[in-house]
Amino acid sequence: MAARSIVKMGTPSLFEKSRPWPADKFDSPELHALLADMKDSMIAANGAGLAAPQIGENVRVVIFEVDNNSRYPKREPIPFTVLINPLLLPASDEKVDDWEGCLSVPGMRGLVPRYPKLRYTGFDQSGAAIDRTVDGFHARVVQHEVDHLDGVLYPMRITDMTKFGYTEILFPNLVGDDDN
Ligand code: NI
């Protein structure tokens, strides 16, 4: 298992809709190998999340995690999660803006409207059902990752393009990273 290079914006496969993970391939060597590469790649890139298309696999598999450590002092921790074939169920039509970055769009940040609270369902690597209701950064991260499975990158959701730019300009004092 190894960290793979991250596919960057401009690559056509990032704009494709990914196919569902096959129901008969949970807990398979193929899935465990994919997840190991995804986790290694996310850690190597200091990411908070990663979708399979970002390492060149167009399947509906995402991972995310925010440790309770000093790298993300303002973010609530999110347990390490493997989410396969996800479904998002927003609590309402309301959206709120917050800043996002993406490992496929390095060095940049943008202000993105997202649902502040939602329920999500899906499966873990063994095929066990996941059903969570979340808010805050957790809700934002899962929407960002699931967008990758539908061929959507966060710049495509920015409504005010004056709030899209280089991290070093927008946040000159930023320590650490939380791209996904
Ligand atoms: Ni991303």
Image (spheres, rainbow, N blue to C red):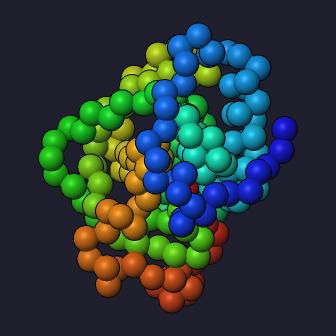
Of the 4 image quadrants, the one containing the C terminus is bottom right
Q: Residue at x 79, y 49 (%)?
A: 3
Q: Residue at x 52, y 75 (%)?
A: 108
Q: Going 26% across and 77% down the picture, which residue do you hit? A: 160
**Residue 51, quarter of the rendered image:** top right
Q: Residue furthest right?
A: 1
Q: Which quarter of the picture shows residue 121?
A: top left
Q: Is residue 143 left or right of residue 73?
A: left
Residue 49 screen position, x and y as percent:
57, 49
The vertical placement of 179 against 163, above or below, is above
Residue 131 picture location, percent across and down:
39, 23
Relative to 165, does residue 82 appear above or below in the rendering?
A: above
Residue 57 lies left or right of residue 100; in this view the side is right
147 in relation to 32, above or below: below
Left or right of 154? Residue 103 is right
Residue 92 in percent (x, y) is at 16, 42
**Left or right: where does residue 18 sit relative to residue 72?**
left
> Can the viewer see residue 66 in this picture?
no
Residue 170 lies, in percent from the top left, at: 46, 84
Residue 176 seen: yes
Instruction: Assign the N terminus to one quadrant of the image.
Output: top right
Name the residue located 28 percent from the left edge and 43 percent from the top edge.
117
Q: Residue furthest top?
A: 24
Q: Residue furthest left?
A: 93
Q: How many marks?
A: 0
Front residue of 145 and 23: 23
**Observer-nearest of 172 and 16:** 16
Farthest residue, direction front: 12
